[in-house]
Image (cartoon, rainbow, N blue to C red):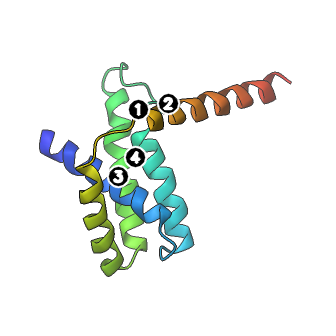
Amino acid sequence: MKDRAKALKREALTLWVAARDPRTPLAAKMLAGAVAAYAFSPVDLIPDFIPVLGLLDDLLIVPLGVWAVLKLIPPPLVAAYCAEAAALAERPTSRTAAVVVVAVWAIALAGAAWLITR
């Protein structure tokens, strides 16, 4: 299970690389960005503290998204993205990026709340 979780993280990083590359088809780029953002975001559709359902969304949404994106990208590009993702995985993590992700989610939630209450 632990090995599969590491592989899924590596695949999500591959999608993030694919979403930023201009050679990626537009549909794949958009889906790759959404799946990577969801995979790396600290905010889930169903919070992890909810028994079974909290982890089920991560076990279904991310792998299905990875599968769909990889079907949309030509195999030679996928191989290049995997190599780049492996190199990136060796680098240290960025706390600044984590703060930016949380800030974007907070702004999005605040905007949604404002629109709903308006």
- Determine the residue positioned at 40% across, 74% down: 73
Give percent across and percent down for residue 29. Answer: 51, 65
Tell me the SS state at disc 2.
helix
Residue 1 in sight: no
Q: Nearer the viewer, mark 4 or mark 1?
A: 1
Give percent across and percent down for residue 38. Answer: 46, 43
Mark 2 residue type: Val
| Dot placed on the residue nearer the N-terminal end, 2 or 3 | 3
Q: Are marks 4 and 1 in contact (CB under 8 Å)?
A: no
Name the foreground residue: 36 vs 57. 36
| Dot placed on the residue nearer the N-terminal end, 1 or 3 | 3
| Dot placed on the residue nearer the N-terminal end, 4 or 1 | 4
- Determine the residue positioned at 36% across, 57% down: 66
Mark 4 residue type: Ile
Q: Which residue is mark 4?
A: 61
Q: Which residue is mark 3?
A: 12
Mark 1 residue type: Arg
Q: Nearer the viewer, mark 2 or mark 4?
A: 2
Tell me the SS state at disc 1.
helix
- Determine the residue positioned at 48% across, 77% down: 23
Quarter of the figure that contains the C terminus: top right
Q: Are marks 1 and 2 in contact (CB under 8 Å)?
A: yes
Left or right: 43 with respect to 70?
right
Q: Which residue is mark 1?
A: 95
Residue 81 in sight: yes
Q: Are marks 2 and 3 in contact (CB under 8 Å)?
A: no
How dense is the environment of label 1, judged by Cα within 10 Å: few (below 14), some, or many (20 and up)?
few
Q: Which mark is residue 99?
A: 2
